[in-house]
Image (cartoon, rainbow, N blue to C red):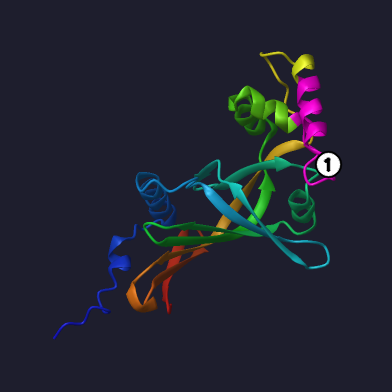
Amino acid sequence: MRRPLRHYALKYALMKNPLDTFQSWLDDAKRHGVHEPSAMALATTDPDGRPSVRMILLKHADDAGFVFYTNTESPKADALRHQPYAALCFYWNPPGRQVRVSGRVEPVSDEEADAYFNSRPYLSRIGARVSKQSQPLNGYAELERGVAAEMLRHPRGRVPRPENWTGYRLVHDYIELWQERPFRMHERMAYKRIGKGWREQALYP
């Protein structure tokens, strides 16, 4: 008798360290041609407990955590100063996979922020110096004038990292891997950090 919903293939495809599976899935998303496979939703809460979510880009992930960069005067940075915990969510379709991550958030070192900033394209570095992220803008021309002025101050060459721009690392203590299946019989596996290892638990869809 056929039992198509009882194969639970996800468990046998996972690696011992959930981050290794994440990296494998991220590579698969790139091979499938997913637009911006490093795009992730970042959820934070403000001092009043109101949640906020936005799409940002993952810049690096390893056993130490998931790294992203932003203006330190932005709403997300302000939220993280008051409540240094956050959650991430990746979704790739195809191949129909989701990864949820949560943990404590901490700033990266100045050396790490400098190294990444200096690796960015010239105009991206100029834009970071000009942008007053999330503040009111009196038309796009105002932004263009700011970019032109900053380019005159810093012609192609060294563009210093602004003091109000750095990176944050989400130190993950929870990762959930979700694989799409027919008839909404999706497979989910949750990992909670226990000491230096992980405890895994299958979840209902």
The amino acid sitting under disc 1 is Leu
Which segment did they paint magenta?
129-150
Residue 132 on the magenta segment: yes
Q: Quadrant of the N terminus?
A: bottom left
Q: Residue furthest bottom?
A: 1
Q: Residue furthest left?
A: 1
Pinpoint residue 150: horizontal percent, then vertical percent: 78, 21
Q: Is residue 184 visible?
A: yes
Between 165 and 14, the one lying in front of the other is 165
Q: Secondary structure at mark 1?
A: loop
Residue 197 placement, left or right of 70: left
Q: Quadrant of the C terminus?
A: bottom left
Residue in view at x 82 percent, y 62 percent: 47
Between 197 and 192, the one lying in front of the other is 192
Residue in view at x 74 percent, y 54 percent: 80
Pinpoint residue 178: horizontal percent, then vertical percent: 42, 66
Q: Which residue is mark 1?
A: 137
Residue 122 placement, left or right of 51: left
Residue in view at x 63 percent, y 24 percent: 118
Pinpoint residue 5: horizontal percent, then vertical percent: 27, 79
Q: Is residue 162 visible?
A: no
> Dividing the picture into quarters, in which one does residue 115 lie?
top right
